Image (spheres, helix red, strand yellow):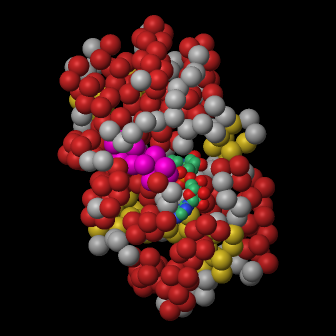
Amino acid sequence: MLRIPIRTESRNYEAIIEHGVLARTGQVLAKTLGNASPAFVITVLPVRRRWGKALSRSLEAAGFSPKFIDMRDGETHKRLSTIDQLAENMVRLGADRKALVIAFGGGVVGDVAGMLASVYMRGVKLVQIPTTVQAQLDAAIGGKTGVNLRTGKNLVGTFFQPELVLIDPAVLETLPQREFRAGMYEAVKAGIIGKPALFDQLAKIPIKELRQDANFVTRAIAESVRLKAEVVSADEKEGDLRRVLNLGHTLGHALEAATEYKHFLHGEAVAWGMQAAARIAVDTGVCDNATYERIRDAVHTWGPLPDVNIQNTKALKLLRSDKKTEAGTVHFVLPKKIGKVEIVKNVPESVIISALAEIRRASRA
Ligand SMILES: NC(=O)c1ccc[n+]([C@@H]2O[C@H](COP(=O)([O-])OP(=O)(O)OC[C@H]3O[C@@H](n4cnc5c(N)ncnc54)[C@H](O)[C@@H]3O)[C@@H](O)[C@H]2O)c1
Ligand SMILES: [Zn+2]
């Protein structure tokens, strides 16, 4: 059992990672929380169908008397009306201030149930049990919760830390292959930011082999969680340090937005964003050519990514309107070398345009 501490101003807690730990959730929770309060498990049908029994058995055995509440699956249901519905259901099921909310699903469930816990009766306890790669190595860590508005993603939300994050890589077995791969690009990202050994290993293993290697999957998730925990512990609320986690995301978000979030999975857009960041870094003298090539090659070892068709003007416009843009300056997180990044403002437009040209070209090769 791996325990990774996360220290924030509002709370210190742990991410626990172990293959098969889902079956021992009740035990682990009882130990962490000290007592067994009524648990309200927020989930989606695909997760409950496959893993709900294992979780409810374990919670029941430890005295948590769990009640499951489904929300509709998918990013389009990550919205305020879902919080409203879930909260009404909680009241109907008798949830009071002592209720425990368990977020059991991917990043969508984590963000919605996290926000629900932060506002339900002005805040109840929360435990994250993430079930996608994306959620296990990223979304469930750090305490950001939120929902989308029609006008944009993640525009309403809270910072709310859980009591515990319980990560069982065994539940990834039922995840569609495309989702698995997309999430693992975030592990590549973690490698470039600060885990060079992880990067080296990921860069040379085919994705199918990686998936079959349970120890490797656990390690890749654990190392990524460790990186995020280190960054978040130093900077809970998105100051300059937390920004390093956005490697590949500046352009990645623009690619997602330009295609109405339908063409790329998030991690796939981030993969293209990492190649673009590496190109920008070599063109501005931030990294050497060898580093650029290693990142480019790593992005492509797991097979073709959805193609890039974005026009330069559209991309530049989206980059300037990104939520993280300050006074019109786009910040790029750029690799200095594998394991070290730096934040650069004022990247010349011509450099961005040639990076865009490169990923468009690469997607047609
Ligand atoms: N809060 C944060 O810091 C943070 C960080 C990164 C991403 N996010 C958010 O996370 C969301 C994306 O999360 P995601 O990629 O996990 O998507 P998701 O939650 O939509 O899950 C993807 C799909 O996989 C299914 N699924 C989940 N677990 C499964 C399992 N074990 N077996 C089979 N199917 C399973 C889901 O039902 C869904 O259909 C976005 O809304 C994003 O904004 C938040
Ligand atoms: Zn991401």
Rendered residue at 44%/81% (across/down):
23
Q: Is residue 244 visible?
A: no
Q: Eyeballing the image, is 239 above or below 20? A: above
In the image, is residue 186 part of the stretch drawn in magenta?
Answer: yes
Quadrant where the C terminus sits is top left
Ligand 1's quadrant is bottom right
> Horizontal and vertical percent for residue 49?
60, 74
Residue 142's place in the image compared with 101, above or below, is: above
Does residue 135 sit above or below 340 in this rendering?
below
Q: Position of residue 79 (x, y in %)?
A: 72, 51
Residue sitting at x 43%, y 49%: 181
In-image side of 288 versus 164 (left or right): left
Q: Quadrant of residue 197?
A: top left
Q: Is residue 333 visible?
A: yes
Which residue occupies the foreground of this view, 346 or 82?
A: 82
Residue 309 sits in which quadrant?
top right
Q: Position of residue 204 (x, y in %)?
A: 24, 43
Locate residue 254: give its quadrant.
top right
Q: Main secondary structure of the magenta part?
A: helix
Q: Which residue: 46% across, 26% down?
A: 363
Q: Which residues are magenta?
A: 178-190
On the rendered image, what quadrant is the N terminus found in? Answer: bottom left
- Residue at 35% across, 71% down: 19
Q: Is 350 in the magenta?
A: no
Residue furthest top in the image? 350
Residue 251 location in percent, x, y? 50, 27
Q: How many marks?
A: 0
